[in-house]
Image (spheres, helix red, strand yellow):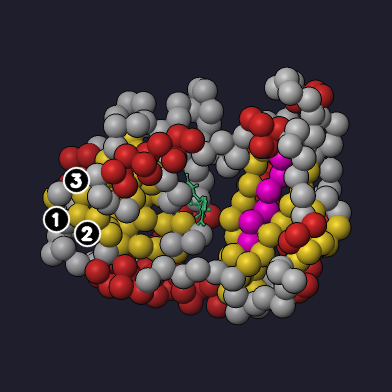
């Protein structure tokens, strides 16, 4: 039994969804992915996720082998076959099977997988009480080496940051970029509300262009909240009135403590609450029907 997986052109039971031991996604982290969510029978921001997937592919010179229109159908059909209307979807495209050397030219065909499963929703307590986070010593990848805008299968940078946070007893890490400006969390973008302006680091800070980030910026502008994509420091973070993280799984999650400093009143702020309400409303109407 188990779930049905899309695996290189076929829909197969989980037990038959296999990846070669010579797949360069496995051997070298050579590949890309997307994490997508379906809400109430609609796939939230599917087009935006696929645009980002194909841009990541283009950036690493990976030929996915199927069109964006076909990929849309893969996502929808995987959801249908698993009878899911609220789900978490993981699209993975790896360089495919090659030899033990790292040369991607030895991999004739990309491997494409789509997994759709039940969504594990975060404990509602976290949205009411807020998270404690820590800025970690490990810096976000230098965009000159591995641009964080590529959603690659190589997440060691993020995992090292997560390990550091966990070791310090907090659940999430905030990474700084090479210049020491605030960049992002391990699987989420960061926002602060300070002196009447909602701020998030610009893409040039070396961060992933989060789909949730972009949706929040749109919503904030519609609500008449001043927004700014600008560099900010740990000082700005410590002295912000509100802070929250955004990501597909977490949606919007409030932060109430950073490196031991309590932010504002130490509870989720009013701007956060307004944005979360509008974000959840958007998830009910956005995206193609399954
Ligand atoms: N920054 C990084 C480094 C990420 O990996 C985000 C920001 C948020 O992007 P979206 O488009 O999701 O708003 C991510 C998201 C998950 C999950 O389950 C998300 C990511 C990776 C693994 C799991 O939400 N990346």
Q: Could one spot residue 203 in this view of the protein? A: no
Q: Is mark 2 on a helix, strand or loop?
A: strand
Answer whether labels 2 and 1 touch (C-beta < 8 Å): yes
Q: In which quarter of the image is residue 217?
A: bottom left
Mark 2 or 1 closer to N-term? 2
Queried whether the magenta region covers residue 168, the answer comes back as no
Q: Position of residue 46 (x, y in %)?
A: 65, 61
Q: Relative to residue 45, is residue 93 drawn left or right?
A: right
Which stretch is magenta? 89-95
- Vertical comparison of 125 with 172: above or below: below
Q: Quadrant of residue 39?
A: bottom right
Q: What is the C-alpha distance between the residues marked 2 and 1?
A: 6 Å
Viewer-side residue, 246 vs 48: 246
Residue hosting label 2: 256
Q: What is the C-alpha distance between the residues marked 1 and 3?
A: 9 Å
Residue hosting label 1: 262
Q: In which quarter of the image is residue 4?
A: bottom right
Instruction: Give the residue drawn at x 19%, y 45%.
Output: 259
Cβ of mark 1 under 8 A from ligand 1: no
Cβ of mark 3 under 8 A from ligand 1: no
Q: Position of residue 178 (x, y in %)?
A: 36, 26
Instruction: Give the residue drawn at x 52%, y 23%.
Output: 145
Q: Relative to residue 91, is residue 142 drawn left or right?
A: left
């Amino acid at each position: 039994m188990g779930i049905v997986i899309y695996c290189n052109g076929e829909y197969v039971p989980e037990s038959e969804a296999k990846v070669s031991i010579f797949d360069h996604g496995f051997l070298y982290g050579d590949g890309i992915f997307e994490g997508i969510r379906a809400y109430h029978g609609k796939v939230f921001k599917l087009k935006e996720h696929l645009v980002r997937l194909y841009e990541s592919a283009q950036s690493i010179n990976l030929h996915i082998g199927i069109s964006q229109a076909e990929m849309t159908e893969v996502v929808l059909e995987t959801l249908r076959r698993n009878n899911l209307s609220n789900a978490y979807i993981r699209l993975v495209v790896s360089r495919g099977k090659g030899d033990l050397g790292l040369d991607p030219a030895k991999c004739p065909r990309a491997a494409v997988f789509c997994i759709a499963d039940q969504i594990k929703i975060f404990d509602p307590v976290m949205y009411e009480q807020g998270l404690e986070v820590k800025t970690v010593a490990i810096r976000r990848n230098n965009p000159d080496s591995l641009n964080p805008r590529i959603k690659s299968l190589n997440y060691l940078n993020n995992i090292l940051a997560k390990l550091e946070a966990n070791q310090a007893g907090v659940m999430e890490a905030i990474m700084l970029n090479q210049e020491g400006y605030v960049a992002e969390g391990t699987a989420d973008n960061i926002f602060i509300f300070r002196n009447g302006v909602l701020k998030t680091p610009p893409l040039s800070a070396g961060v992933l262009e989060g789909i949730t980030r972009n949706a929040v910026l749109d919503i904030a502008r519609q609500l008449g909240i001043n927004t700014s994509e600008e560099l900010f420091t740990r000082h700005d973070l410590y002295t912000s009135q509100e802070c929250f993280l955004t990501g597909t799984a977490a949606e919007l999650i409030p932060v109430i403590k950073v490196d031991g400093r309590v932010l504002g009143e130490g509870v989720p702020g009013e701007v956060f609450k307004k944005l979360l309400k509008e974000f959840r409303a958007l998830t009910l109407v956005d995206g193609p029907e399954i």
